[in-house]
Image (spheres, rainbow, N blue to C red):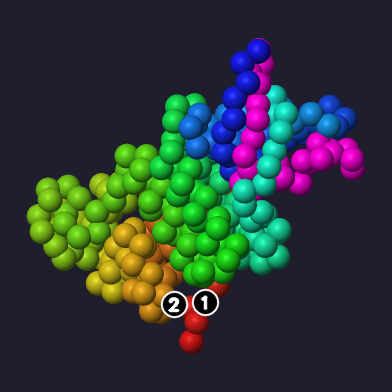
C-alpha cells in the first residue's frame, strides 16, 4: 500500500475499539483526511500525545481501503498543553478547529492549513487576546473559503465607503441605498476594528474598547453562522475576555 508523509494539525479525535482512535487532520498537502491511529489509547503508546487536538505533527501514513493509517508521528508544534491551560484560549481553539473542519475538504488546502497553524501558535504563545485571535481567524478563514466580507465599500453595489449599515447576508457593510429597512447601524470604530481583524492590523485591533470588540464579535459570529449554514457547536461556549485597561 502507498506510504506518504505530510504535516498535519489535529482537528478532532474519536475512539475506535478498545485502544485506537480515528483522527481528523488538516494536512499541508493532502487537505482534510481521516486516519486511524492504532494503539494510541494505551499507556505505552509512543505517539498518542502527539495526536491530540491542536497539535501539529509530521506524520507518516499508508493508504487503507477506507481510512488511512498513521504509522509515525513527530511533534512540530505542541500547542495543545499551553492552550488547555487557559479556558478562553481553549474555547477559542475549539471554535477554530471546528471551523477548519467545516470549510476544508479533501483537496489541498495549504492556505487554510497555514492560517490555522499560525492561529493556534498565537494562542499558545499568548501573542494576542483569545477573542481577537479567534475573530481574526474566522474572518480570514471565511475569506479563503470564498466568503470575503467587505468592511469598506458597499458589499452590494461597491459604492465607496465609509458606510455604517451591516447586513451579514449581503456580505458586510452596505450603503444607505442598498440597506434594507431596519438594517443595524454600527459605529465607525467598530467597522475599523472589523477591517483590522480581517487584515491583521494588530496595533489597531488591540486598542479597541469593549463596546467595539463585543459588537465586532457579534457580527463575526453571525457572519460565520450564515455562511456555514449550520451553527458552530463550539461558538456559544467561547469565553470573551474584556479589553485590557
Residue at 45%, 49% in the rendered image: 115
Labelled pair 1, 2 in contact (Cβ < 8 Å): yes
Q: Find residue 50 and report its image quarter.
A: top right
Horizontal side, residue 23 vs residue 4: left or right? right
Residue closest to the eye, 93 or 55 = 55
Alpha carbons under labels 1 and 2: distance apart: 6 Å
Q: Which mark is residue 98?
A: none
Q: Of 116 and 176, which appears nearest the observer?
A: 116
Task: Give the mark, 1 or 2, whose residue is nearer the N terminus.
Answer: 2
Left or right relative to 213: residue 74:
right
Residue occupied by mark 2: 210
Q: Is residue 167 visible?
A: yes
**Residue 80 lies in what quarter of the image?**
bottom right
Q: Which picture quadrant has residue 108?
A: top left
- Looking at the picture, how far across and down is residue 51, in whole percent? 70, 42
Residue drawn where x is 50% and y is 56% of the image = 119
The boundaries of the magenta stretch are: 40-68
Secondary structure state at the residue bearing disc 2: helix
Q: Mark 1: few, some, or many residues within 10 Å (few <14, many ≥20)?
A: few
Classify 171 as above or below 175: above
- Residue at left 38%, top 51%? 140
In the drawing, what numbered circle is on residue 242?
1
Q: Residue at x 24, y 54 (%)?
A: 150
Residue 155 on the magenta segment: no
In this view, the residue in front, 240 or 62, is 62
**Quarter of the figure with the N terminus:** top right
Residue 22 visible to an observer of this rendering: no
Amino acid at each position: 500500500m502507498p506510504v506518504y508523509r505530510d504535516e498535519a494539525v489535529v482537528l478532532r479525535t474519536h475512539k475506535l475499539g478498545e485502544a485506537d482512535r480515528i483522527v481528523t487532520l488538516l494536512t499541508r498537502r493532502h487537505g482534510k483526511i481521516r486516519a486511524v491511529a492504532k494503539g494510541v489509547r494505551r499507556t505505552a503508546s509512543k505517539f498518542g500525545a502527539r495526536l491530540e487536538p491542536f497539535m501539529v505533527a509530521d506524520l507518516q501514513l499508508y493508504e487503507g481501503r477506507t481510512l488511512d493509517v498513521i504509522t509515525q508521528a513527530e511533534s512540530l508544534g505542541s500547542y495543545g498543553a499551553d492552550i488547555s491551560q487557559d479556558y478562553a484560549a481553549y474555547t477559542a481553539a475549539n471554535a477554530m478547529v471546528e471551523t477548519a473542519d467545516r470549510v476544508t475538504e479533501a483537496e489541498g488546502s495549504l492556505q487554510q492549513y497555514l492560517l490555522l497553524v499560525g492561529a493556534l501558535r498565537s494562542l499558545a504563545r499568548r501573542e494576542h487576546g483569545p477573542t481577537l485571535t479567534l475573530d481574526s481567524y474566522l474572518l480570514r478563514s471565511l475569506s479563503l473559503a470564498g466568503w470575503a466580507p467587505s468592511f469598506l465599500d458597499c458589499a452590494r453595489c461597491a459604492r465607496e465607503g465609509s458606510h455604517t449599515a451591516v447586513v451579514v447576508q449581503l456580505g458586510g457593510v452596505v450603503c444607505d441605498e442598498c440597506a434594507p429597512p431596519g438594517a443595524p447601524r454600527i459605529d465607525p470604530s467598530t467597522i475599523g476594528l472589523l477591517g483590522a481583524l480581517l487584515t491583521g492590523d494588530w496595533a489597531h485591533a488591540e486598542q479597541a474598547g469593549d463596546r467595539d470588540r463585543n459588537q465586532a464579535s457579534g457580527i463575526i459570529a453571525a457572519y460565520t453562522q450564515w455562511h456555514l449554514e449550520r451553527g458552530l457547536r463550539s461558538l456559544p461556549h467561547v469565553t470573551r475576555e474584556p479589553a485590557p485597561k
